[in-house]
Image (cartoon, rainbow, N blue to C red):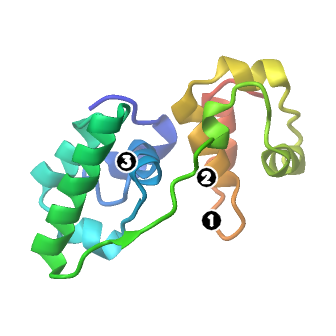
Amino acid sequence: MTDLFQFEADFVDSLRCIPMQVRCKLDTCGIKLKLSDWNQMTTDERQALVKLTCTTETEIQSYREYIQQLIIQRTGIPATKLPIEPHPAWLDSATVPASLQEKAQEIGVTLTQQHWAGLTPLQRFALIKLSHPGHENKNFPRAIAEFHLL
């Protein structure tokens, strides 16, 4: 599997939790996936969700249809659709989100625009997700370190 982060190492081998790259694809295609639904999927189905691409409009539509089909098969209920952000912050390499900057400053890190631009979109996505209030934030400092932002 590719693009799995070191801060996810405690669960990626078993895929017991939804990895960031799948979370990014879910946001991209506008599907909410509950952990309970993820855990009803087979390992092969989870691995397929990791490996499938979700970049072009065609891929995004295919991913959305595939995951909807899986969720219906496993739960009998369609997945909740989410609004798709037309200009997601993780794709904007020019602007560090203020909320992320604030979260980084809480742990003594200043994220510059140069740092931000040097990250991949998936790394930026991970930092944004890990900085949200209510998210288990133990992985935020780990991601900061893994991405060499200290």
- Circle number at residue 107: none
The residue sitting at 70% across, 53% down in the picture is 131
User: Which residue type carries mark 3?
Assistant: Val
Q: Is mark 1 on a helix, strand or loop?
A: loop
Q: Residue at label 2?
A: 129
Question: In which quadrant of the rendered image does the C terminus lie?
Answer: top right
Q: Earlier in the sequence, mark 3 or mark 1?
A: 3
Q: Which residue sits furthest bottom?
A: 76
Q: Which of 9 and 20 is in front in this view?
A: 20
Q: What element carries label 2?
A: helix
* Residue 37 appears in the figure: yes
- Circle number at residue 22: 3
Q: Which of marks 2 and 1 is in front?
A: 2
Question: In which quadrant of the rendered image does the N terminus lie?
Answer: top left
Q: Earlier in the sequence, mark 3 or mark 2?
A: 3
Work out how far the residue at label 2 is from the one at label 1, CA to CA, in angstroms: 8 Å
Work out how far the residue at label 3 is from the one at label 1, CA to CA, in angstroms: 16 Å
Q: Residue at label 1?
A: 135
